[in-house]
Image (spheres, rainbow, N blue to C red):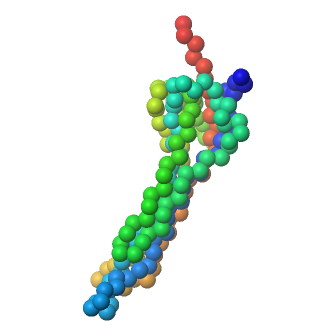
Amino acid sequence: MQFIDQAEIEVVAGNGGDGIVAFRREKYVPAGGPAGGNGGRGGSVILNAIEHLQTLLDFKYAHCFRAENGGRGGPNNRTGKNGSDRIIEVPCGTVVYNADTGEMLGDLVQPRQMLCVAKGGKGGLGNRHFLSNHNRAPEQWAYLKSSNVCRCSIAFKITLPP
């Protein structure tokens, strides 16, 4: 069995979904108000310490981990689907560093301890959000696709019993 004690990975959080422009449509309401829903939030990338893992061998071939993007908003003020989080299992005793700055992000010592290394983007805003007394039928929307990309260097430290 091969033992790997250090690896470098790239994690990409999910983008937030787009908001939409939509208007309410009913039979006897000729000019319905805005009804565009907001986009869903993007998924985050989370490291989870697992007790039974003993090496970082899984990261020798898999270098990039992506979370799911958020869904687009819908008509009738429906919010888009949130992106699912990507959970990466690492052994207990893993130290996580930012590969670009060298800053320590966390030390996963306890079993089931979690560390969020890339937070998902916020969802965009539908035209319902821009409704005001001055703008009764807004036709603008916003997308907030600010996802987080991080290069992480992970090291496995071995603690021997006394």
Residue 84: percent from left, percent from top? 48, 52
Look at 61% across and 47% down and name the residue there.
65
Residue 4: quarter of image: top right
Q: Is residue 123 visible?
A: no
Q: Farthest left residue?
A: 28
Q: Farthest top residue?
A: 162
Whether 40 is drawn above or below 96: the answer is: below
Residue 56: percent from left, percent from top? 64, 30
Residue 5: quarter of image: top right
Whether 138 is drawn above or below 12: the answer is: below
Q: Quadrant of the N terminus?
A: top right
Q: Is residue 74 visible?
A: yes
- Between 137 and 134, the residue placed more toward the observer is 137
| Residue 46 appears left or right of 10 | left
| Residue 58 appears left or right of 85 | right
Look at 54% across and 10% down and name the residue there.
161
- Between 58 and 155, the residue placed more toward the observer is 58
Q: Quadrant of the C terminus?
A: top right
Whether 10 is drawn above or below 58: the answer is: below
Look at 53% across and 63% down and name the residue there.
145
Residue 32: percent from left, percent from top? 32, 86
Residue 30: percent from left, percent from top? 31, 92
